[in-house]
Image (spheres, coloured by chain):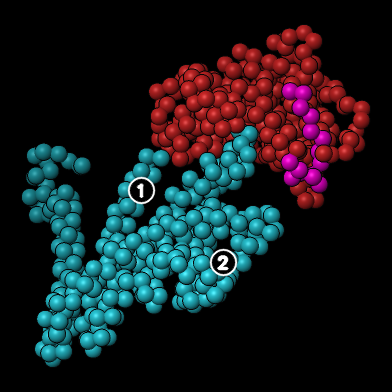
Chain colours: A red, B cyan
Amino acid sequence: MSATSPINVPVRDPYAKPGALTPPDAMPIVRLENVEKFFGSNHVLRGLTLEVYPRETICVIGRSGSGKSTLLRCTNLLEEPTVGSVEVDGLRIVADPLHARDRAHRERIRQIRQRAQMVFQEFNLFPHMTVIDNLIEGPVRVKGLSRDEAIATAEKYLDKVGLRDKRDEYPARLSGGQKQRVAIARALAMEPKVLLFDEPTSALDPTLVGEVIMVMEELAHEGSTMIVVTHEMQFAREAADRVYFIEEGTFIEVGPPEQVLDKPQDERTRRFLRRLLSPGVAVPR
Amino acid sequence: MSLSGPQQVAITESLRIKSPDVIVAEVRAARARESRRFRLVFGLTWVVVIGLLVGSLAAAGKVDVTFLAMWGPYIVGGIPITIVVSIFSIGLAVMFAVLGALGRLSVRAPIYAVATLYVSLVRGTPLIVQILFIYLALPQIIPASAGIPVIVLAIFALAFNYGAYMTEIFRAGIQAIPRSQIEAAGALGMTDSQTMRRVVLPQAIRIVIPAIGNEFIAMIKDSALVSIITVQELLWRAQRVGQSNFRSLETLLLAALVYWVMTIAFSVVQDRLEKRMAESDRRI
C-alpha cells in the first residue's frame, strides 16, 4: 500500500470538543487531517481538519462552490483527497492519488463507505427496485445478511421514517420528500457509524422540506452521528453541536450554532448569512 | 363554463352563435372524419397498387399458380427454421454484445483492445464472408469443426456478427445510466462488479430493448444469408425448388412475401411490447 503519511504528527481539530450526547473519553468517529483536494489545477479544499465524536451532529455551511460537498465526498472517498488523511471508525486512509486503484486501497475504501453512509441531494434511489429492495440491497450484497434479516432491519427503518406503507412501491411513485426519507432509511439500514447528508433538502419542493428535516432532527436527538451539509439554518440551530462555515476550501468560522449563526465573528460569515436570510436583496460581496 | 341555464340559452339564441361546447364537439368530429378518410385512402392505395402488380403478373400468365400450390407448403416449411435461427442468433448476439460493451468500457488495456478488435474486425468485413469462413475455412484450421451441424455454425456466425454491431448499442445503454446511480451503489459499499450487475446492467437492458427488437427484425432478413451454407431455411428451399424447375419467379415472390409478412408481424409484436414497457415505466 501507500508510503507513510507525509504528516506524521496527527493534526487535531482545534475546535472539536465532544458534544453533549457524547460519552466521556470517546474517540472521534470521523477524523479528517489536513485534507486538500485539487480538481485539475482547481484547489477546492485547502487543508481541512475536522473531528466528529460519537452522537454529534456537525453542520457545514457555505456558498455553493465553497467545497462543502467535496469535503463530504472526501469523507466517504467518493472523491479521493489529493493530500491528507481520512479516518472513519478507526480505519485510516492516507491520500494516495497515484495508487488509487490498488486492490487493498479500494477494499479499505469499501470498508469506510459501509461505515459512513451518504444521503444525496438527488436521493439516487435505484429506480428499477422497489423501496424494500432498495433498502436491503446493501445489507444483503455488501454486509452479507440473509434476506430475511435484511428485510426485518429495513422495515424497522421504514417505520422510523414513516413510510412502512410504501414498502412495495417503486421510487417514481413517491414524492420528493418521500424519496429522500427512503434514501435516509436506505442509509440507516446499513447501520453505519456516521451519516453524511449532502444538501438533503436542496432538490425538494419547499413544502416537502419539513418532513425530511423532521426525520433528521429526530435522528440527531436520538444520538446518530451526522455530518450535514445544508442551507437549512433552522436545522443547524436546532440540532447541530458545531457549525463549520467554509469558504474557498477553508474553515472560516467554527463554533456552536448560537455563536456562528447569531454572533458571527468574521465578516465573510456575516455576509453569507445576510444573503441567505434575505435572498433577492443585493449584498455587495 | 361561462353563463349558465336560461341566460346562456337566451344569449345563444338571440345572437344565433354556437355555444363553445358545440364548437369543440364539431372540431373534434371534423378531425376524426379527416383521420378516417386518410386511413381509408391509405388502405385503398395499397390494395390498388398491390392488386395491379399481382393482376398484371396473373394476366400475363407468367405466374404458375398450380406449381406454387404444389411446392408452396415445402417452401413455407422453412419458416420455423428461419425463426429458430433468428431467435437463437439474437440471444447469443446479446451475450456477445454485453461482453463486448463491458470490454469497450474497460479501463484495462488488453480487455479494451480485444473488444475493440472484435468490433472493428467484424464490422469491417462482409457478413457473407464471415459465414463462408466459418463454414468452409474453419474446418481447415480445426478439422473437428466439420462435424458440427450447419445450423449451429450459422447461428454462431450470425450471432458473432450481430454481437459486434450490438456492442455499440449496449455500450450506449450502459453509458446512459447516470453517474449518480454508480455513486449511490459505491456509497453503499458495493464493488464495481456488483454495481455493474445489480444497478447498471438491469437499467441499461431496459433502455436497449427497443433497439434489440429492431436488430431482431433485421436478423430475420439477414438469416437468409445462411442459405448459402445449406441451412434449409426459407430462402434455401425457395432457391432449390425454383432453380431446379426454372420457376424462380414464383418461389422468390413467395419467399419475399413470407419475409415481409414476418417482419410486419414482429414489428406489431414489438410495438405492443414497447407500449407495455412504457406503461410499466410509468409504474417505475
Residue plotted at (58% across, 54% down): B102
Label 2 sits on a secondary structure element that is helix
Q: Give the image location of residue B24, x and y in percent.
A: 18, 53
Residue B209, x across and y down, in percent: 41, 54
The 10 Å Cα crowd at callout 2, few under 14, some 14 to 19, many 20 or more, is many
Q: Which mark is residue B143?
A: none
- For the residues marked 2 and 1, what is the alpha-carbon distance in whole angstroms? 30 Å
What is the x, y in percent for residue A245?
74, 29
Magenta span has A98? yes
| Viewer-proximal residue among A74 and A67 | A74
Q: Is residue B75 above or below residue A127?
A: below
Q: What secondary structure is found at the residue carrying circle 1? A: helix
Q: Residue at x 12, y 43 (%)?
A: B8
Of residues A31 and B243, the one drawn nearer to the viewer in this rendering: B243
**Which residue is tagged 2?**
B119
Under mark 2, the amino acid is: Val
Eye-nearest disc, 2 or 1:
2
Residue on which the image places disc 1: B277
Say whether residue B130 is left or right of residue B45: right
Q: Is residue A88 above or below residue B275?
A: above
Q: Please tell me in which quadrant of the rendered image residue A101 appears.
A: top right
Residue type at tag 1: Met
Boundaries of the magenta span? A89-103
* Chain holding disc 2: B
Residue B92: name its quadrant.
Answer: bottom left
